[in-house]
Amino acid sequence: MRVYNMDTFTELVDRLTQDPVLRYQCGFEVFGRVPSIATFSRFYCRLTESGALHELFKQ
């Protein structure tokens, strides 16, 4: 999201839906479905609560 200057998960999902190259670069199937906004939100929430992002940043 930061690389493409996106502020919301909505923008990310919209872009992933329209751009098969970005889907591929992010590790999703080129012709597959894109995860929902809620899925991205839950994943981000779990990452921040787990402290994993903080540990990665420190490393």
Image: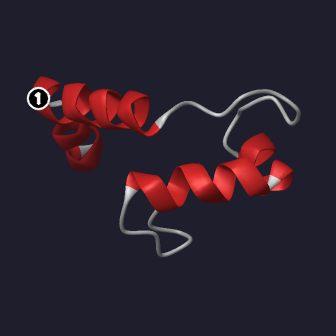
Position in image of residue 47 (x %, y %): 25, 30
Q: Residue sitting at 21 percent across and 33 percent down?
A: 45
Position in image of residue 46 (x %, y %): 22, 25
Residue at which label 1 appears: 49
Left or right of 48, for residue 16: right
Position in image of residue 7 (x %, y %): 36, 68
Depth check: give the residue in front, 16 or 56.
Answer: 16
What colour-coding does the image apply?
Answer: secondary structure
Q: Amino acid at mark 1?
A: Glu
Depth check: give the residue in front, 58 or 16.
Answer: 16
Left or right of 11, for residue 8: left
In the rendered view, would you say 39 is above or below 18? Answer: above
Q: Residue sitting at 71 percent across and 48 percent down?
A: 17
Depth check: give the residue in front, 55 or 44.
Answer: 44
Label 1 packing within 10 angstroms: few (<14), some (14-19), many (20+): few
Looking at the figure, which quarter contains the C terminus?
Answer: top left
Secondary structure beneath dot 1 equals helix
Left or right of 3, for residue 59: left
Left or right of 45, for residue 34: right
**Furthest residue in direction right, as rendered:** 31
In the rendered view, would you say 5 is above or below 33? Answer: below
